[in-house]
Image (cartoon, grey):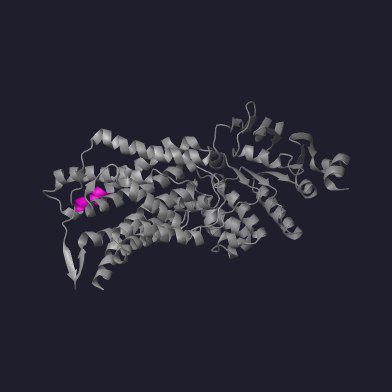
Amino acid sequence: MQLVVENLSVSYGNIKALHGISFSVDQGEIVTIIGANGAGKSTTLRAISRMIPCEPGSKIEFRGESILKYNTDKVVSKLGICHVPEGRMIFGNLTVTENLTLACFARKDSDGIARDKKWVFDLFPRLDERKDQLAGTLSGGEQQMLAVGRAYMSGRQIMILDEPSMGLAPLLMLDMFEALKEINRQGTTILLVEQNARLALKFAQRGYVLEHGQLILEGPADGLLDNPEVKKAYLGA
Amino acid sequence: MDIFLQNIINALQWGSFYAVVSIGYSMVYGVLMLFNFAHGDIFMVGTYIGFGIATLLLALFSAFMPGWMIFILVILITMFLASFVGVFVEVVGYRPLRGAPRASAAITGLMIGIIFETGNLIILGAKRFSFPPLIESVTYNFGGIYVTNVKVLIIVASLVMMAALHLFIKKTKWGMAMRAMSYDFQAVPLMGVSINIIAPMTFAIGAGLASVAGILYGQAYPVLDPYMGISLGWKAFVAAILGGRGSIMGAALAGYLLGFIEMFVPMFFPSTFRDLIAYSIILVILTFRPRGFFGMAHSTQLRL
């Protein structure tokens, strides 16, 4: 297993957001965690990226090594766990190219950076057209492309994505997931949290269901799609 | 008319000090969203370092080295040493307060300032030192307007420093990271950028600039004392607010504006009214434009 999370607990003050969840992601997989608003999906990803502290007893391992000793920037630059955050968080005062360049801050391989930049522009030609524009002037869909492209440049062992479909028109959503598949074909593992359960489960190979800070179900994605409980609670059927 | 032109030169010189020092406030605010209230005293410490280096180099090299070369050496060595003062303030003073309430950081800044002032008194005593002239002063007379080469040097050196800073922020990846911090500091570590590099770097640049301002100040007003940073520091802080929190360009422009107001008010009013009128004008500007010239409306959250 590439990423192993065991007994992960996170609290915000007195409020416990995650009650010791455990899951794992294998190299090259596409795994999704679905759940309602406030279930703890973003918290899980933020804990993996070390943006928020987790409680004692929690274990997060990447290739057998605990990541808890690293800061956020090292999780990205040293381990290659890149994070597409909720709400995109692109730098609106920087140009598209600058956003991509900044993501390579810790990288020294200028050839690789140039190659990856080209690859991202090939994957998202819209970004290429707008590369000298301030990122704040992009449309929502383009900003999401930039957030994904930027994450790809910062490190690519695992890409963790927080609701990439949020705020996107249905067609753009499908395009975005096609692009993610392409990134996965390049060898990047994908861990995705989504409220749009149907889309996420169609895209992923395996899935987990998160409810009130606990994982209540897990299994192959098509199995979850057919699961009556999941259908009732998340697929609206 | 002559007095008017004369005052423009003086205002440019005076405004240069405000501009360069207030940039230090603005940069730190842009990156960490806190005002480093020790900055005025960092300016003082930088001036003393410059004084020490200048005295030393003059004693060692003045026999065989031209004055301008010593001047440049003093600036470079002082900038280098003063940048460590900035790093020290960040690492020891502010870094342990990450996540602490906003007021704690402000109090800490004021405390660091007091430590620098009293530390200076303990180490050097109450004796007042005089900054040695590094450049022989020459006065030019342009049809009744007197311009010294020191004034020209101060104005030009300040502009050069600001232009260099501008290039650094626009063109380098460190500058890019600083700009990104001012937009969304939470997303910056996700780019693999360590805040523990960007934050001390920002303090170091601010302190380096302030120390050069101190050397230039010492050329124009040679008397040094441990409290010299307080008044200039607060006024530069006012300029940073007036320019718009976090805006470097705004801080520089407001610094010059402040210099102009302070120089021109005594032309029309008794000079004892200078500060009263100067700051009343600023108060009026801020009443109508609370975010300053170039400031963005921000949510206020301590980010350190």
Q: Is residue B218 above or below residue B269?
A: above
Quadrant hosting residue A71: top right
Q: Is residue B13 above or below residue A32?
A: below
Residue nearest the observer in this picture, A144 or B301: B301
User: Which residue corresponds to the image point at 42% horizontal and 42% vertical from the top-left?
Assistant: B200
Question: Percent position (x, y) of residue B206?
Answer: 38, 48
| Secondary structure mostly taken by the magenta-highlighted segment of the chain | helix
Q: Is residue B257 toward the left or the right of residue A46 in the image?
A: left
Question: In the displayed image of the protein, which residue is found farthest to the top?
Answer: A57
Q: Is residue A83 above or below residue A54?
A: below
* Range covered by the magenta-colored residues: B69-75
Q: Is residue B43 visible?
A: no
Question: Percent position (x, y) of residue B110?
Answer: 40, 40
Q: Is residue B235 magenta?
A: no
| Quadrant position of the N terminus of chain A in the picture | top right
Question: In the displayed image of the protein, which residue is found farthest to the left?
Answer: B63
Quadrant hosting residue A228: top right
Q: Is residue B182 visible?
A: yes
Question: Percent position (x, y) of residue A100?
Answer: 55, 54
Marks counted in the figure total 0
Quadrant hosting residue A204: top right
Question: Percent position (x, y) of residue A185?
Answer: 67, 49
Residue nearest the observer in this picture, B244 or A77: B244
Q: Is residue B289 toward the left or the right of residue B155 in the image?
A: right
User: Which residue corresponds to the image point at 73% horizontal and 56% vertical from the top-left?
Assistant: A173
Q: Is residue A29 above or below residue A180?
A: above
